[in-house]
Amino acid sequence: MIRRLVAYCALMLGLLGMVAPATAQSRPAAAPNYTKMVTITPKGAFVLGNPRAKVRLVEYLSYTCSHCAQFAEDAFGPLKRDYIAKGLVALELRNLIRDQFDLTAALLARCGGPSRVFQLTEDILARQEVWVAEGQVIVIRQEAQWKSMPLARQLQTLAKGSGLLQMAQARGLAPAQANACLASEQMNKTLLAMTKDAVENRKISGTPSFLINDQPGPRSPRWEDVDAALRAALNAR
């Protein structure tokens, strides 16, 4: 009886061993969600999408640039849906800082790290007119004290008064963390070095400006023109 039971168990284990691989093979591996995949370059730029994508689109961005806001409104939806989600194109954001308003927004967008930077960028650009106007009011009201404030204090005051801090908080950024980022000398240096490289080495004179696979992209800020350039780059490879 015992021998028959042992033989039966051995037979069942063998059958299970034969079935298990087939079951595992019948489940295809989940496709990567490239619209959530963010990496950081050695120079501190954030890259959304497949790091090995055939095409790398670099955008030089200023958060106070109205053309950048319009490009984000027109482009980010189809860019993510038609190119980034499919692993064809990766989007790299490089900052070109124009003023203290821009610096404040850039520091806050980057403060949340890879998981928040692109969503905060969209939020900030979508409400650009509102927070810039509110920030200008703050500067005018505090004109007497403004010039004597240390830079970190200026940025913190601007972030709170303009509504930028509230936008960052809505995305899960704690006020203490945000204020620390606004006072961070290292983060400031990273942004200024990126700006210096854009202006002095790349000869970028305005935003948005684009590179496609490290070559100058279309001069136009219109999504239709960037879209055509991406399709041409994909077809060329």
Image (cartoon, rainbow, N blue to C red):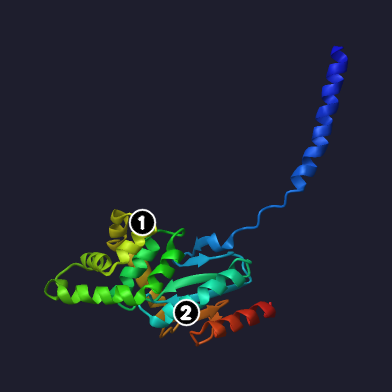
Question: Which amino acid lies under the numbered mark 2 shown in the image of this protein?
Answer: Phe
Query: Where does label 2 land, which residue?
Result: 71
Q: Are marks 2 and 1 in contact (CB under 8 Å)?
A: no
For numbered disc 1, what is the local secondary structure?
A: loop
Q: Quadrant of residue 50?
A: bottom right
Residue that lies at the very extreme toward the left in this rendered image:
144
Residue closest to the far bottom: 219
- Would residue 45 be found to the left or right of residue 29 on screen? left
Q: Position of residue 175 (x, y in %)?
A: 29, 56
In the structure shown, which secondary structural element does the residue marked by tag 2 occupy?
A: helix
Label located before the other in sequence (2 or 1):
2
Seen in the image, is 31 located left or right of residue 100? right
Position of residue 36 relative to residue 231, above or below, is: above
Q: Residue at x 83, y 18 (%)?
A: 6
Q: Which mark is residue 173?
A: 1
Q: Residue furthest top?
A: 1
